[in-house]
Image (cartoon, helix red, strand yellow):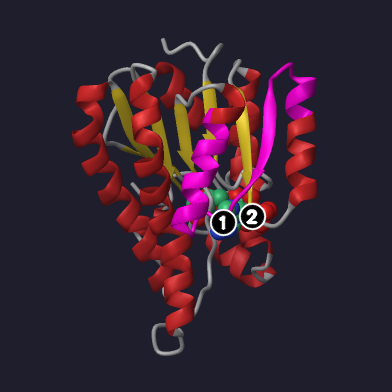
Amino acid sequence: MYELKEKVALVTGASRGIGRAVALELGRHGASVVVNYHQNEAAAQEVVQELAKLGAKAAPVQANVADPEQAKALVQAAVERFGGLDVLVNNAGISRDRTIRRMSVEEWQEVLRTNLDSAFYCVSAAVSHIIDRGGGRIVNVSSIQGQAPNAGVANYASSKAGIIGFTKVAAVELARYNITVNAVCPGFVETDLIAGLSDEIKQQLVSRVPLGRFGRPEEVASLVRYIVTEGDYITGQCLNLNGGMYM
Ligand code: NDP
């Protein structure tokens, strides 16, 4: 078992949705948590306050992880604030759905930079610090869309399939340093990311889920926490959590 007390976790995009739930779950299990956000400072502060109520040390750090310099500064801030880094959760993500015929170059690049390039930036900045601690955990948030995508998500699906490939290579490269690297692939989860879908689309999507409902952020957070605390012998995997939507 990987004990989270005395460990430092950095969760990107932790102000809302899945990242928020992961930050709270890791804090509940004893980690000190760096709550990264992009624009929503008030929400990040609220997560830090929730963590304090759970007895966890926490700090909000603003950074756009799609920018390599800001990602590096984020990792540095985490190390300076809590004296090291053990766990990195690459969760920050966006969608800009459009068919390939209508998708702009900007929409393609913004999603790839935010969802995929950011993981490379954060991992490459974090690795030497995690090695300094004798090893640790990296969890990347992918998606069912990287495995069995719908139409209209070429940018998003490519970023999430890319995360799976990146996870496997990082797992091979970092195993010798006692660092496990895994991905989680959620199906549809009730967060702001899907709040904008019409009721009709939501109904269509739910009808494709054998368990008959969307997932909850806390369910993804439990899986991430399980990988971190129980996953000594789990690396290079993509763990699915999708209500049976993709098998
Ligand atoms: P939300 O839209 O609810 O939250 C997104 C989070 O990412 C926010 O904290 C936001 O910060 C942050 N963020 C966005 N862009 C950046 C950036 N450039 N730099 C730093 N932080 C950023 O999304 P979800 O919680 O739904 O999604 C989280 C992850 O889970 C994403 O990678 C998503 O692709 C993935 N996922 C989601 C699914 C779903 O159905 N919801 C299903 C499968 C995977 P701020 O609040 O400051 O804007």
Q: How would you rate the neighbour count of disc 2 (Cα within 10 Å): few for under 14, some for 14-19, many for 20 or more?
A: some
Element type at marker 2? loop
Which residue, given by chain and number where applicable, does mark 1 sit on? 64
- Residue 171 in magenta stretch: no
Q: Position of residue 200 (x, y in %)?
A: 64, 71
Q: Residue at x 59, y 23 (%)?
A: 82
Indicate yes or no: mark 1 CB to ligand 1 under 8 Å.
yes
Residue 150, placed above or below residue 98: above
Question: Is residue 68 in sight in this rendering?
Answer: yes
Residue under numbered circle 2: 38
Q: Amino acid at mark 1?
A: Asn
Provide residue 202's location: percent of width, then percent of height. Answer: 61, 64
Label 1 vs label 2: CA separation? 5 Å
Does the stretch in magenta take in 58?
A: yes
Q: Amino acid at mark 2?
A: His
Which type of secondary structure does the marked residue at label 1 adopt?
Answer: loop
Q: What's the residue at 52%, 56% (across, down)?
A: 93
The residues colored magenta run: 50-79
Residue 4: assigned label: none
Q: Earlier in the sequence, mark 1 or mark 2?
A: 2
- CB contact under 8 Å: marks 1 and 2: yes
